[in-house]
Amino acid sequence: MSSFNDCQQGTERVQGIVFDFEKKKYTRTRRISWVRALNPCSALAYLIEKCKIFLRQGQEGGEKKKYTRTQWISWVRALNPCLALAYLIEKCKIFLRQGQEEGEMILDTEGFKSMVNLRLLQINHAKLQGKFKNFPAGLKWLQWKNCPMKNLPSDYAPHELAVLDLSESGIERVWGWTSNKVAKNLMVMDLHRCYNLVACPDLSGCKTLEKLNLQGCVRLTKVHKSVGNARTLLQLNLNDCSNLVEFPSDVSGLKALQNLNLSNCPKLKELPQEIGSMYSLKQLLVDETAISVLPESIFRLEKLEKLSLNGCQFIKRLPKHLGNLTSLKELSLNQSAVEELPDSVGSLSNLEKLSLMWCQSLTAIPESVGNLHLLTEVSINSSAIKELPLAIGSLPYLKILSAGGCRSLSKLPDSIGGLASISELELDETSISHLPEQIGGLKMIEKLYMRKCTSLRSLPESIGSMLSLTTLNLFGCNINELPESFGMLENLVMLRLHQCRKLQKLPVSIGKLKSLCHLLMEKTAVTVLPESFGKLSNLMILKMRKEPLESPSTQEHLVVLPNSFFELSLLEELNARAWRISGKIPDDFEKLSSLEIVDLGHNNFSSLPSSLCGLSLLRELHLPHCEELESLPPLPSSLEEVDVSNCFALETMSDVSNLGSLTSLNMTNCEKVVDIPGIECLKSLKWLYMSNCKACSLTVKRRLSKVCLRNIRNLSMPGSKIPDWFSQEDVKFSERRNREIKAVIIGVVVSLDRQIPEQLRYCPVVPDIQANLLDQNKPIFSTTLYLQGIPKTHEDQIHLCRYSHFNPLVLMLKDGSEIQVRKRKPPVIEGVELKKCGIHLVYENEDDYGGNEESLDESQQSVSQKLANFFNSYEEDSQVC
């Protein structure tokens, strides 16, 4: 073994070294990087470029060892580099030696002995061997994350040490049981997430400590009394010390402390009575503690800027002199048990943020809050507050008022119009039945949220005066109509009216909303669009889907889109499902040239315009349950998804060979379609659903080619056979040498009992067939086969499901694993019958040949070609109806 004794020349000039042996599970390499050399000479600059050398750990005889982690060595601050230093760096690779345990790194302290000028040392995730007294006496910065020791040696006295970072370590006491005193010149001590730490260091000998971090030290039960006399301490973090029960009662020495964090210490029941002596304190965080009373002396904290009592379930009242905290900018009482706020809260003249969310015992806010002229944000979400104070309208700088979930809040004060600076008002799920006319005075408001305000019946005409409004969300409200003044909202970008089930019409003035981009009005009672609708020149998203009618007898009058509708040239997404659109879609449809997604399912039109193919940006076309649609015109080549499922009258389709990007085609229950010309050219097709397409089943099977089957993930169509080269029994996986498993293909033949309730036949999938993966007869993974499209027949349907190598069913395969296909017990749908199943494993090189395979023997053909042969030679099934 080599040691640092071999490279002592020049080491007296080294001022900083970084060793970081942090583990990384995914790497097997070992690297060295060098950083930050001060005043580099040409020799050192060359060295920095070339020093990414691998450390070779020699056993006796020079045998190379394997490494299991990435290792970095960085040298920092080499002053006045010379040839001796270059020699040192060249030799440093012998500084490390491999530990007995795999992946463990041990450093010999002997190598540090000659580094008399070493000031910075980082040895994260490493072990040390040797005496600590070898560390240079002048060391100022030591970082040793994941230190394996229970305590530092008692003979190690780093008098010059300024920063000690032992975070995330197994340390129990910093300097052992006999002495736990820290270095006298220490300025920063970081022990966060030292889960085994049982004793807080004794700070009585430390005259310079400014930061002490004990966050997450869950075994720590009390703080050493010397902390209360740490006169230079600026920050003390005890967050997440879940077993802390005692904080020093004498804190008279903490006159410089600025930040005290005691949050998430659920066993801490009291604060020091003389907390007021911490007169430099700016932040006091005691969230989720068991504190029941704030010390009366807290009013002396004249520099306090943030007081957080979130989740304090035992605090019911605040000190009456709270208003003396004149520097306070943020007061947070979220989810506390506070029952009332003292009137003195109005004296917090610098308060900017007041948060009272989920205060279930707080029913009122004092009128004195109107004196908080610098207040910019008030949050009372889900509290028990019944009304807002009249004085709230006198807050000139208030920008955000959030009252969502305040179910007891039934009205807004008339003074609300005085909030001249407010930009966001949230009133979701309140009991407000009307808005005062004065609300129109909110000239700067940009966002108004009133989701699920079920008591709200109308909006005031004055809402048109909110000229800065960009977002209005009325989701789930019971409003009957929108006022005509609505058209004055010239900056409105987003209007959400989802589930406003009583809204019967849109105002004629809606066409004046020139900035409107998103109109979301699904499940409303609106049946007619005003002629001015086409003037929404910037509309991009229009969603007005309705629930499909249960039976045709309940239909109201059929709908015809206004002529102006086709002037929406920027429209990108249109969802008009179940709008009862009838007749023919006009040829003007091609004017909607920006359309990318169209959903016109559950409508009554009989044909689509031939101009549809001119929509060059269209990616998705959804037409399910258009039961009067008889034909599909030529489609744009940009399409990726087409859904015409349950179009029972559909008979003809145009050639689809131009749809090179099509990935999904759903034609379930299109039983009159006689052919799908061009389907053999769909090289991107992944999902093909043709259950109960009886008229075209054989024709399409003859058309299926290797090209269109290569990427298929799910396929369904009428049939009662599966390929005979599929295994008809459970499959046991066997690893093949140098050939990875690439996919698993499962084929099933399924039928539905004719007694299945009709409504269940409109479910999107058959959910009752599962593939199970077993290891030593124990299930380790299960997945439901995605059998899209429930046929409106009891006849057999064949389904193929292909699982690629990234699917858990394939990823989790190992030698001896077993794959089985079973019916779910108990079933989701009664009447599903699994008649046949087969499994085929696809290995490397079995389905990646792109050439012509017609002359090849079946044993040499790719899986996709064999599937094409199976379908091309398929004979018509004889099934008893």
Image (cartoon, helix red, strand yellow):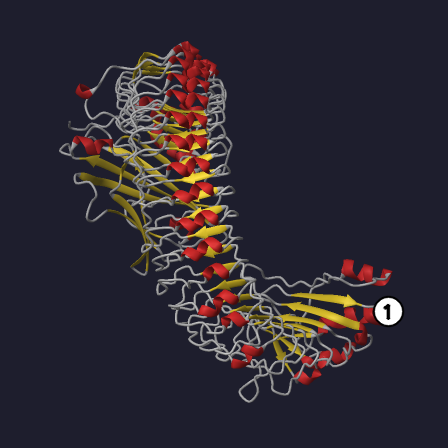
Question: In the rendered view, does 578 fall on the left or right side of 461?
Answer: left
Label 1 sits on residue: 83
Question: In the rendered view, does 538 fall on the left or right side of 361?
Answer: right
Q: Indicate the quadrant containing the C terminus: top left, top right, bottom left or bottom right.
A: top left
Q: Indicate the quadrant containing the N terminus: top left, top right, bottom left or bottom right.
A: bottom right
Question: In the rendered view, does 485 fall on the left or right side of 2?
Answer: left
Residue 639 versus residue 233 in the image, above or below: above
Name the quadrant containing residue 429.
top left
Residue 287 percent across, percent down from the top left: 43, 62
Q: SS for tag 1? A: helix
Name the quadrant containing residue 681.
top left
Residue 575 percent across, percent down from the top left: 37, 25
Q: Residues within 10 Å of mark 1 (few under 14, many from 20)?
A: few
Furthest residue in direction bottom, as rendered: 178
**Residue at (82%, 74%) from the top-left corner?**
10
Residue 377 percent across, percent down from the top left: 48, 46
Residue 149 versus residue 853 in the image, above or below: below
**Closer to the camera, 440 or 876?**
440
Numbered label tally: 1
Residue 553 versus residue 443 in the image, above or below: above
Give the residue type at disc 1: Leu
Q: Does residue 138 appear in the picture of this structure?
A: yes
Q: Does residue 214 appear in the picture of this structure?
A: no
Name the quadrant containing residue 475.
top left
Question: In the rendered view, does 311 fall on the left or right side of 325?
Answer: left
Residue 746 versus residue 600 in the image, above or below: below
Residue 224 percent across, percent down from the top left: 51, 80
**Closer to the camera, 719 or 397?**
397
